[in-house]
Image: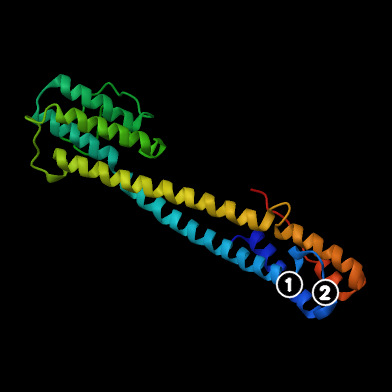
Amino acid sequence: METGHTKNVANFETVIIVLTALGSVYNPVQALILLTALQTKLAQAKAALASLDTARAEKTVKIDEVEAGFAGLYKYVVNIKRTAEVAVNDPAFTADLQTIVNKFSSAGRDTDLVDDPATPDIDESRTGRSTSERSRDKQLAHLAAIIALLHTKADLYRSNDAAYTIAAVETRHAELSALNNAALAALAAEANAEEARDEILYHPETGILRLVQLIKTELARNPGKDSAAYRQINALEFRKPRP
C-alpha cells in the first residue's frame, strides 16, 4: 500500500474508534457521518487499497513477462532474414526483409558494412541498439509484415531450424501479441483501481476527507472543541498525495 493513501485510511479508522468511544454523545443528523455509514466507507477504502495492490502486482508480473518475450525479438528477425537469404536466394527479397528488420532498431544506423554470415549473432550492417525503445505494437506490426512477405515465397522459404519456419514465426507473433495484450490489460486494471481508490477517498462530496471535515464540525458543536474527542481527531492529518 502507498504511504499517503494508507495513512489517510488508518487515520480515518482512528476517527471511527474515537467516535465509537463517545457512545450516545455522537448523534449526527447527517446520514453520511453516521457510525454505520463511516464503517461501511472504511471497509470500502480498505478494499480499494487492497485491490490496487493486487492490480499493481499483476501489472508488474505482466510487464516482466512481455519484456522477457520481446527481449530477443531483434535477433530473431535478423535470423529470419538470414534464413530467407540462403533459402530463397533472391537479393531483392533479402533487401525487402532487411528494410523491415531495420525498423526493429530504428535508433541504429547504417555502418556501410556487409552483414557477415559467419557471425550470426551480430548484424554488421547496423549499429547495435536495444529494441526497448521501440513500441511493442509497432514491433508486432513489423513481425506481421515479415510473415506476409515470407508467405509470398512460401514455395522457396525453408528452414532446418524449427524456430524459423513460417508456422513457428506465426506462433511467435501470436504469443507476443497475447503477452502484449495481457500487459495492456494489466495497465488498464491498475488505472481503474486507482480511479476507484480516489473515488472512495477523495470524492469532493462523499470521500473520507470530506467526511472528516463534517465530523469535526459536528464535534465542534457537541461535545465541543475543548473535548478530547475533537482534539484527537483534529490532530490527525488528512491529505491527498500528489500524483
In the rendered image, residue 56, in percent from the top left (x then y), is placed at: 49, 56
- Work out whether residue 185 or residue 237 is closer to the camera in this orientation and state it: 185
Q: CA distance from mark 2 to mark 1?
A: 9 Å
Q: Residue at x 64, y 58 (%)?
A: 200
Q: Residue at x 93, y 72 (%)?
A: 226
Decide if residue 96 is on the left or right side of residue 159. right
Decide if residue 193 is on the left or right side of residue 74. right
Q: Which image quadrant: the N terminus? A: bottom right
The crowd level at tag 1 (other Cα within 10 Å; few <14, some 14-19, many 20+) is: some
Decide if residue 39 is on the left or right side of residue 55. right
Residue 122 against residue 38 in the figure, above or below: above
- Work out whether residue 118 or residue 173 is closer to the camera in this orientation and state it: 173
Q: How is the image coloured?
A: rainbow
Q: Is residue 59 visible?
A: yes
Residue 235 quadrant? bottom right
Kindly identify which numbered label has been placed on residue 35.
Answer: 1
